Amino acid sequence: MPDPDYLARLARHLCRTDLADLPGPVADRARWLLADTVGCIAGGSTAPELQHLREALAHDLNGGPVRVIGTDVRAGATMAALLNGTAATVLEMAEGHNRGGGQNAAQLVPAALAAAESVGASGADLLRAVALGYEVGVRFGRATTFRPAIHPNGTVGAVAAAVAAACIAGADEERMALTIRLVSPLIVANSWQIAREGGEARNIATGHASAAGVLADRMAAAGLTAESDAPGTVFGAAIGDAFDGAGVVADWGDPWFVPGGYFKRYACGRYIHA
């Protein structure tokens, strides 16, 4: 039976978990996730396709509070998250998690940075946002039975990004749950086939997820309404064959999934690593 209260319970956990409540390995991993992803963004920003993309979007990059990493460009939070999230996966060095969620850090860190830089948030607030967003991303990934053609990037990573942005904003439980409901229809149906073909547009999926996370938090702040169980519809019917909402919340904090991911040693897909 579907669990109608899982989002409320998830929001309660998120809003009542401070940085000091996180086990040492979880907080340490959040630091590494942040450092590793910033490095991936800085390196990826030098790729020709990113340079060409910035040129194509030049009229939209008219200044703002958030740095486009690896450049001297500043932009609004949503556009900066888009470009930084796209750059994060260009070099095939972005971390991942085998138990669910794909490359969550590449999608949530740009959103967390954009939200934090917009309001001058503290480093502690940023680390908390990264840790909690990552945990939710993995839990959504584990709870979803994806359709075979769907690549997870651009999907649960958008939820992770939205949670991170909402954490930075100091969202209460109602707004946190609303943000998750609002971001769910904004995900992309990214495919494995474009990854096999090496299409450069595949990296936009991570950038789009970052931007969608920032946008969803702004939508929640504006009071826009959403479907009551948008994740259930999107993850359980649109891009997946099943979604276990109760499983997202089950055993919160025991275990923590944040430390269980991997960092890449080589610039290639994880399937190629020995």
Image: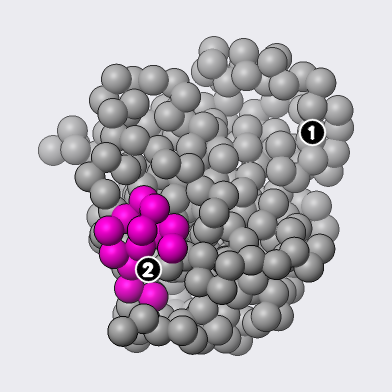
Any part of residue 129 in sight: no
The residue beneath circle 2 is 139
Q: Position of residue 160 (x, y in %)?
A: 51, 60
Q: Which mark is residue 4?
A: none
Amino acid identity at mark 1: Arg
User: Which of 111/128 is in front?
Assistant: 111
**Label 2 crowding class (10 Å Cα cut-off): few <14, some 14-19, many 20+?**
many
Q: Position of residue 215 (x, y in %)?
A: 69, 51
Judged from the image, the secondary structure of the residue bearing numbered disc 1 is: strand
Classify residue 164 as left or right of residue 254: right
Q: Which mark is residue 74?
A: 1
Q: Given the current orientation, which residue lies at the most extreme left position?
A: 274
Amino acid identity at mark 2: Arg
* Label whose residue precedes the other's in the sequence (1 or 2): 1
**What are the residue bounds of the magenta stretch?**
233-245
Judged from the image, the secondary structure of the residue bearing numbered disc 2 is: helix
Q: Residue at the location (54% across, 54% down)?
A: 185
Classify residue 137 as left or right of residue 184: left
